[in-house]
Image (cartoon, coloured by chain):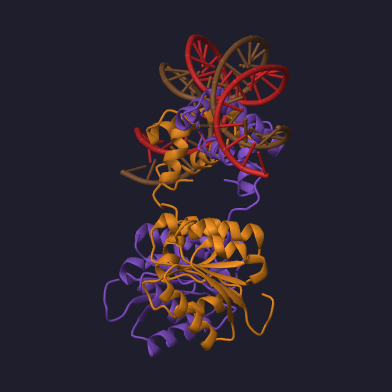
Chain colours: A purple, B orange, C brown, D red
Amino acid sequence: MKKETGLRIIIVEDNIVVKEAFTVYINDLSNHSVVNSYTNCEDALKNLLEDHPDIILMDVDLPGMNGIQGIKEARKVLPTVNAIVITVHDNTETVFEALCAGASGYITKTSNHFKILDAINEVAAGGAPMSGNIAKMVVESFRKTTESPLTSRETEVLHLIAKGKSYKDIADILFVHVETIKSHIKNIYFKLEVNNKAAAIEKGLKNKLI
Amino acid sequence: MKKETGLRIIIVEDNIVVKEAFTVYINDLSNHSVVNSYTNCEDALKNLLEDHPDIILMDVDLPGMNGIQGIKEARKVLPTVNAIVITVHDNTETVFEALCAGASGYITKTSNHFKILDAINEVAAGGAPMSGNIAKMVVESFRKTTESPLTSRETEVLHLIAKGKSYKDIADILFVHVETIKSHIKNIYFKLEVNNKAAAIEKGLKNKLI
DNA sequence: TTAAAAATCCCTATTTCAGGTGATTTACAA
DNA sequence: TTGTAAATCACCTGAAATAGGGATTTTTAA
């Protein structure tokens, strides 16, 4: 963040009423400044270097380039810029696409609009603001299933398979004989009801075994 | 959550002063109840079914079984129980281990102790409470590097390689000839300076190309 | 004291992989 | 317009990896 006295913010939101409401709200009730606001990504990207925002408030549904692509492009130009997605979408795919694209936060519009100031301050403090339901989705994406049909050794082997290691590599890593690994793999295939590596990895990922 | 009138909470924390402080605080200043508190996981697990907590407040550093293992075990017995980790550790490894083990939230002790009530309420509301720095770590774990040496086609191929697909499978999936895939893979190996699948996957994961 | 898991070994046929050395077409930018 | 990068396809070779079959021993946990 550049100044302690307030951050430079731009807004990309095609709903003009919402855009103006955010602008007024931030300018009046915080020490941050909305230096510019746009109704599409293309225009925002054109002025990005001049605006040099600290934070971008980004909608997802936009005419032309969508907000997620917009974040990617913006971060190519300003790699340290923080983007906060503000949208109605709370489906898994959109959320994770946005985070992969480099979003620092994700707020759903469903709740109180005025959480944006909290979000801005949280980003400024080095955090990652998220609506409760979004945080839940994110946290759950890490969760492993507690019930696994595989033994810990087999899981270990499957992990290494998924890393592309050969049986010989795995044997060396685990300090056992190659034939032992082959035996484990036979058991893994049996338990997962598959008969090749690709299917084993797929099933392992899908069931969060790895 | 079982009752609207308040949740059943257990605390596992070996520092008795902290444990008592939490207990008093929750019992006095919220409508939730601390039904039991323990200084180690083993004792907590023994009484888990009788306590049938909605939420477990869990420390990480504990004598005997650590808190992360404790969460895993607890969730085997009560699969829907919510665990909130409250600890001084904010290193990447501990955080992700806890989330993988099934923690619903992760609060660092460094900040204001009294955030726990907010955290409990957030879990009750279906959220996932996290300290700002933790949320940041979690969000950043999704972020892809914007600069990739690979073309989009090569990235696509590397993805499928990482899924354990054979060249022939990949060719079929992408509707091109096997030789095309081989050609892509040669280019991937050249760009990533590797000469086998395992190394390519490793480098791809490390650099968040996949 | 059993049963399950882990580790070891052998055999075989097939598939896959990596490296080399090419070519063609399209598309975009200097 | 002239390159360059990307994506496509081709042929060859030898080595490595794989899947499936069967079997035995040791360790560990119930």
Q: Residue furthest bottom?
A: A28
Q: Decide if residue A62 is in sight here.
A: no
**What residue is at 49 percent from the left and 39 percent from the top?**
B154
The quarter of the picture where residue B206 lies is top left
Please determine whether, in this image, residue A84 is positioned above or below residue D4.
Answer: below
Q: Decide if residue B68 is in sight here.
A: yes
Please determine whether, in this image, residue B138 is positioned above or below residue A24.
Answer: above
Number of marks present in the image shown = 0
Q: Nearer the viewer, residue A53 or B36?
A: B36
Judge left or right: residue A69 versus residue A6. Answer: right
Please determine whether, in this image, residue D8 is positioned above or below residue B15.
Answer: above
**What residue is at 49 percent from the left and 55 percent from the top?**
B97
The N terminus of chain B lies in which quarter of the figure? bottom right
Judge left or right: residue A20 versus residue D29. Answer: left
Judge left or right: residue A197 versus residue A33. Answer: right
**What residue is at 33 percent from the left and 85 percent from the top?**
A31
Q: Nearer the viewer, residue A174 or A18?
A: A174
Q: Position of residue B48 (x, y in %)?
A: 63, 66
Q: Position of residue B29 (x, y in %)?
A: 52, 88
**What residue is at 61 percent from the left and 33 percent from the top?**
A197
Please determine whether, in this image, residue A69 is positioned above or below residue B191.
Answer: below
